[in-house]
Amino acid sequence: MLILPPVRAAHTYTQHLAAPPEAVFPLLCPVREAEWIREWAPTRVISASGVAERDCVFVTADDEDDADGDEAVWYVTRHEPASGFVEMLKITPAVTACRLTIQLRPADEGCTAEIGYQHTSLGPRGDAFVAEFTAEAYRSFMTEWEERLNHYLRHGSAL
């Protein structure tokens, strides 16, 4: 048995969104996300309801963690619409294991979304990804996501 210390990076960012939590939460879904991100295209979604729910599983081509065309498997571990909280695990075999958490909270104008990603390397390719997952890179990813979601919330169409 090989036991290693983790090679890991974690970052949190708070987005300011132009709608209340009850309007934003349904969009945090492998199916509905395609409405506000043109490039979003899961290859499979396994869901009793057809949208995000606890134990929903979906698969994406993983160009975020890897340029070799590996698939990533996402598993929704917590899905709590009443409290505005969702947690997902994303596994890209031989690259990374990731935990994503999103907590929505009402704000004066819309809501905030505290979004956390924690990537743990599963090997040399994951080590390289984790090294590049800097606070600056994460902030850039989050501000683009925030801009796309706010555009959709204000205009009803993808940016």
Image: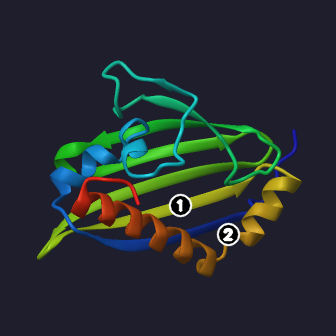
Residue at the bottom extreme, as displayed? 136
Give the percent coordinates (x, y) of residue 142.
48, 69
* Residue topped by disc 1: 117
Q: Is residue 151 left or right of residue 12?
A: left
The answer to which of 84 and 59 lies nearer the viewer is 59
Residue at 54% of width from left, 48% of height from top? 39
Residue at 19% of width from left, 57% of height from top? 21
Give the percent coordinates (x, y) of residue 29.
38, 41
**In the image, residue 124 above or below residue 106:** above
Crowdedness of circle 2 by 10 Å Cα count: few (<14), some, many (20+)? many
Number of the label disc, if any, that sits on residue 133 = 2
Residue at 68% of width from left, 44% of height from top? 62
Mark 1 vs 2, N-terminal side: 1
The answer to which of 98 and 48 lies nearer the viewer is 48
Q: Is residue 76 left or right of residue 89?
A: left
Give the percent coordinates (x, y) of residue 145.
45, 64
Q: In this view, does 138 lie to the left or right of 31?
A: right
Q: Do the residues labelled 1 and 2 touch (CB within 8 Å)?
A: yes
